[in-house]
Amino acid sequence: MFTREDFMNEMKTRVERELHERDIDVEVSANKMNKNNGMEKWALGFAGGDRNIQPTIYMDDFYDKCMDDELTLTEITDKVCDIYVTSIPREDFDVKSIMDYEQAKNNITVCVRNAEMNSELLKTVPHDIMGDLAVMYRVEVNQGIDGNGSVLINNQIMEQYGIDQDTLREQAWKNTKELHPYSFKSMGDVMREMFSGNGMDMPDDVFQNLDSNPGGMYVLSNDAKYNGAAYLCDKETLGKISDMIQDDLVILPSSIHECIVLPSKMCNDMQSLKEMVETVNETEVAQDEILSGNVYKFNGQTHEISVYTGETQNMSQGMNM
């Protein structure tokens, strides 16, 4: 049986050989990559060829499928090579679209991560701390760099931009709201969309249960349902939602992509809610998508955000929002 490292070395050899047979002259390397929340993932990297930027292909899912006998090494090799071929830009990638502020500024957006779990990363990137969360900034690009179509702005890029952090923050939030406006839907509507998207009818008992308590639970994300939990850190958006439901907000972080929002009047036991979030993180959320094990509250009158970690703490310091 392959260890993960043995698998990566075998795939490095096979993929490089197959790409050469397809007349693509690149060198392939097997690497451990640091991802969100301190996770390490194995990936194949590529160098050489006639392109000035190369994709990174993550391999852990392929390893699992190999170990489960779902895919053979030959099938995985073919799939990885196909991904490589479709991932490389048809024309040379213009690095200025990332490194030059005037070209990049309209594509800079916001993402939010857990500060403690990403403490090493935070040493290398401009960021704002908001309670136990870190707001970071990225440049969205058309080609699929890092598999997500974005490049995280690090200190080197920030120095190249020649701007201050206030300018970066203001531009990123402006773009985020224009490119990926917030989505705020009842849990019932979200469930209906999920069932409908899978070509299924919602069971009657689920339908009745959701509709028996209308307006009780909501999902906050963005239109792309990707990095949508950033809106947890935007007081303007939370203020609009608070006005809409005419109550303060209690916010449960589902993942880096979305949050659950409850009217404050429904929430008498913050400790139980915190324990629920912790349990869901342990059992349902991928480690690299965990945002926090805490619970947040937004005051609709003062627009202050606090975090409940076992005791309530104000989390607005350090942010000009």
Image: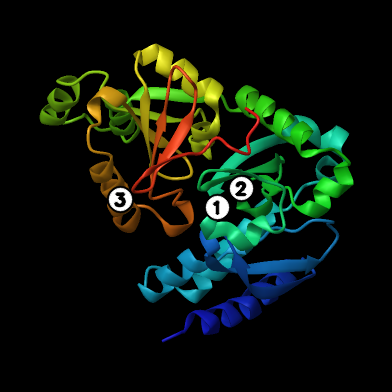
At x 53% / y 34%, what residue is drawn? 233
* Residue identified by numbered label 3: 280
Q: Nearer the viewer, mark 2 or mark 3?
A: 3
Q: Position of residue 168 (x, y in %)?
A: 75, 35
- Residue type at mark 3? Val
Mark number for residue 194? none
Q: Within the image, what quadrant is residue 163 found in?
A: top right
Which corner quadrant holds the C terminus?
Answer: top right
Q: Within the image, what quadrant is residue 38 found in?
A: bottom right
* Residue identified by numbered label 2: 148
Disc 3/disc 1 C-alpha distance (Å): 19 Å
Q: Position of residue 12 (x, y in %)?
A: 64, 77
Specify which label sits upstream in the sequence, 3 or 1: 1
Q: How many marks?
A: 3
Q: Position of residue 54 (x, y in %)?
A: 75, 58
Disc 2/disc 3 C-alpha distance (Å): 25 Å
Specify which label sits upstream in the sequence, 1 or 2: 1
CB atoms of marks 2 and 3 within 8 Å: no
* Residue identified by numbered label 1: 115
**Nearer the observer, 276 or 88:** 276
